[in-house]
């Protein structure tokens, strides 16, 4: 915060011309880790004559905060605004070989002062923390909102409104089949809302593209664009052989095998329904027992019933009650109805699940038919 106090004093004393202050957006390319797959955004404030070059980052979180993992799982994760030198900020991205682009804003003196005061106020201890939301409140949307307040009445470019939040995050997961698989299972119907230019700016790349087209009183809000760091071309890492599709197809193949071979079928059925039940338990937890809004109304609960977890142990015990038999008949019917109506669901389910759901339907029906 001290750096901002110095900068505010300089502005109030009019010791420096506004044209000497450069405020810009830094957009970092996606990284290798899943949490970095969508890139990153930060604000750079620079005064060359003073050697002042700071980056203000809304994407900071602290692993040492109390109940870190519990808060993360329950959607109660606090992010904060932090300030660091540009050299230190860039060092991380150079080390990770992630490209960084810069857009310098075209600001008058009043807009420059507003941005500085806004960031200074956000950096106060009582204001710097905020409740993170992947789509609605993150490192990019905080900057988007700052720019919108700075250029009141700016003209937003049009965008393809057929894209949903899920479509947008899928773009960055083409080479991460397990990441896409897990996200598709965890996120519910709110993720399938259609988006416009404003909403799409939750992604750093989309915000960068939007800023390049935005006009304010007929003039671009970006006066200069450059590449701060150009990465080396990384080697393409193809997905490993055990993709979700392969694993789910293997489950179907084993379900077919154990429909003809009784030996070992009890163990397979236990593993199958126990695993599906655990997934159902996770879906239920994320839907009803967390503050995550995008995990609600999740149609994956249709095939991943948490009650499978209990019935898996019934199968392992070898007991065949009337209730258990008709429970699995209902499971088979529900699974087949889901597959029949697959193309008409308001929430697109991950296609890799199709063989797994077929395996569930097949084994559930066979369990019903067993004497």
Image: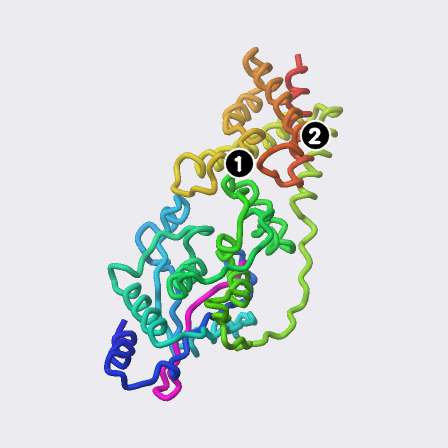
From the viewer's side, name the closer residue of 201 and 91. 201
Q: Residues within 10 Å of mark 1 (few under 14, many from 20)?
A: many
Residue farthest bottom in this picture: 49
Indicate yes or no whether the magenta region holds residue 38.
yes
Direction from residue 65 to residue 38 in the image, left or right: right
Residue at left offset 61%, top offset 39%: 348
Q: Residue 97, percent across and down?
A: 56, 72
Q: Give the vertical position of 223 relative to 70 (above or below).
A: below
Q: Quadrant of the C terminus?
A: top right
From the viewer's side, name the closer residue of 361 and 127. 127
Residue on which disc 1 sits: 279
Q: Residue 313, percent across and down?
A: 53, 25
Q: How many marks?
A: 2
Q: Quadrant of the N terminus?
A: bottom left
Rendered image quadrant of residue 6: bottom left
Q: Give the vertical position of 258 relative to 24 (above or below).
A: above
Residue at left offset 49%, top offset 36%: 283
Direction from residue 297 to residue 347 in the image, left or right: right
Direction from residue 297 to residue 335 in the image, left or right: right
- Label 2, label 1: how far apart the Cα atoms are: 19 Å
Query: Judging from the image, what secondary structure is the residue with disc 2 in?
Result: helix
Badge 2 or badge 1: first in the primary sequence: 2
Q: Residues within 10 Å of mark 2 (few under 14, many from 20)?
A: many
Q: Residue 200, percent across and down?
A: 52, 54
**What residue span does the magenta drawing correspond to?**
36-52
Residue on which disc 2 sits: 255
Q: Residue 128, percent across and down?
A: 30, 61
């Amino acid at each position: 915060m001290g750096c901002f106090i110095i900068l505010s004093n300089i502005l109030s004393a009019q010791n420096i011309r506004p044209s000497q202050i450069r405020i810009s957006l830094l957009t970092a390319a996606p990284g290798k880790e899943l949490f970095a797959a969508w890139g990153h955004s930060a604000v750079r404030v620079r005064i060359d004559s003073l050697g002042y070059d700071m980056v203000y980052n809304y994407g900071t979180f602290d692993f040492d905060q109390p109940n870190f993992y519990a808060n993360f799982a329950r959607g109660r994760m606090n992010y904060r605004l932090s300030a660091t030198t540009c050299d230190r900020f860039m060092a991380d991205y150079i080390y990770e070989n992630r490209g960084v682009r810069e857009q310098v804003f075209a600001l008058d003196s009043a807009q420059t002062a507003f941005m500085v005061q806004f960031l200074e106020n956000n950096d106060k201890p009582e204001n710097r923390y905020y409740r993170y939301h992947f789509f609605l409140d993150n490192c990019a949307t905080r900057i988007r909102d700052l720019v919108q307040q700075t250029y009141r009445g700016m003209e937003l470019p049009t965008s393809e409104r057929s894209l949903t939040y899920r479509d947008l995050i899928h773009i960055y997961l083409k080479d991460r089949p397990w990441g896409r698989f897990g996200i598709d299972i965890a996120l519910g119907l709110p993720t399938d809302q259609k988006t416009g230019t404003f909403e799409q700016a939750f992604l750093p790349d989309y915000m960068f593209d939007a800023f390049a087209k935005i006009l304010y009183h007929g003039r671009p809000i970006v006066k200069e664009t450059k590449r701060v760091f150009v990465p080396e071309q990384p080697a393409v890492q193809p997905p490993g052989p055990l993709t979700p599709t392969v694993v789910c197809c293997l489950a179907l193949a084993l379900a077919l095998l154990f429909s003809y071979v009784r030996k070992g079928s009890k163990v397979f059925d236990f593993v199958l329904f126990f695993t599906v039940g655990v997934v159902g338990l996770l879906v239920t937890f994320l839907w009803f027992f967390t503050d995550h809004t995008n995990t609600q109304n999740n149609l994956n609960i249709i095939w991943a019933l948490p009650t499978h977890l209990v019935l898996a142990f019934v199968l392992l015990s070898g007991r065949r009650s009337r209730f258990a038999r008709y429970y699995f008949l209902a499971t088979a019917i529900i699974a087949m109805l889901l597959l029949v109506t697959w193309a008409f669901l308001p929430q697109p389910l991950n296609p890799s699940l199709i063989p797994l759901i077929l395996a569930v339907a097949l084994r559930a029906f066979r369990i019903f038919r067993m004497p």
